[in-house]
Amino acid sequence: MIDIIPIPAFEDNYIWLIRNQAFAAVVDPGDADPVMEYLLQHGLKLTAILITHHHGDHCGGAEELRQYFGCPVYGPRREKIAAVTQTVTENDTVNLPELSAAFQVIDVPGHTLGHVAYYGINSLFCGDTLFACGCGRLFEGTPEQMQNSLAKLAALPDETKVFCAHEYTLDNIRFARIADPGNVALQEREIRERQIRVQGLPTLPSTIALEKSTNPFLRWVDSHLIAAASQFAGHPLSSPASIFAAIRQWKDKLD
């Protein structure tokens, strides 16, 4: 049996640890210390590290963990990350035999140019590309790239669990309510997520189905979002990339 454990790091990061009774893999270890503490406390051997992109809060602890456990570090081929021992790109597969798991690599440029996601065991580890009710800022890529990346993720099965890397959910919902005020599913989600956070629990994982019904950055075909984005832009918008770009610019302006 596989469990996926959130390890909090920094102010709002989650490092995801995939484990069974004896072995573990970890996704985006920005800090080695809390990962090491968990592994040693539970007597687990780290067999792999998966990195989605080069930002320090996602890969800063990878080298220390690699040296201690001697495990491979998988990371995006199009980015320079010193700790990476095996680069990956679209359609590659990362096999984790100790966990009886395998992950398909998906190229998702936008937040960074080489960003990748890992999909397997009905789970998506998407770093800073897709957030719960949001998406990452476009630090390196174009709106067209990011919209295309998000479209790839939205095409995954509805029941796919979404493990993003930050607890941004309530902040993202606040913007989503502005952009999509009549969305009943979004209103219901806000109530649920607030109750979860009051208990001090993560709002993650989400699901692809929930994101498609509530996340404004995936709803570029919805007539209400198209109208709202066009009003913000000051002219009619029709292409998915232009609608996405306006919504992203709108949120950036309010942040």
Image (cartoon, helix red, strand yellow):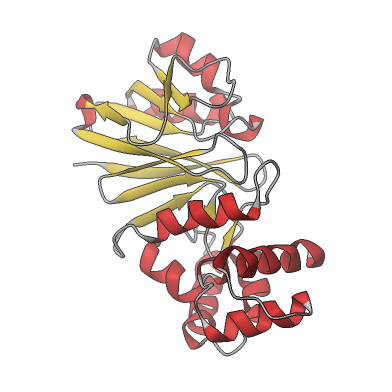
Residue at figure coordinates x 74%, y 83% from the top left: 231
Residue at figure coordinates x 49%, y 24% from the top left: 77
Residue at figure coordinates x 52%, y 21% from the top left: 62
Q: x, y percentage for residue 6?
A: 45, 45
Q: Is residue 148 above or below residue 230?
A: above
Q: x, y percentage for residue 107?
A: 45, 40
Q: How many marks?
A: 0
Q: Is residue 161 above or below residue 20?
A: below
Tell me: 57 left or right of 73. Answer: right
Quadrant in which the C terminus is drawn: bottom right
Taking depth in this image into account, of 73 and 192 the one nearest to the observer is 73
Residue at figure coordinates x 61%, y 71% from the top left: 173
Taking depth in this image into account, of 179 and 221 the one nearest to the observer is 221
Quadrant in which the N terminus is drawn: top left
Residue 150 shows in the view: yes
Tell me: 71 left or right of 233. Answer: left
Residue 50, by quadrant, is top left
Tell me: 157 left or right of 151. Answer: left
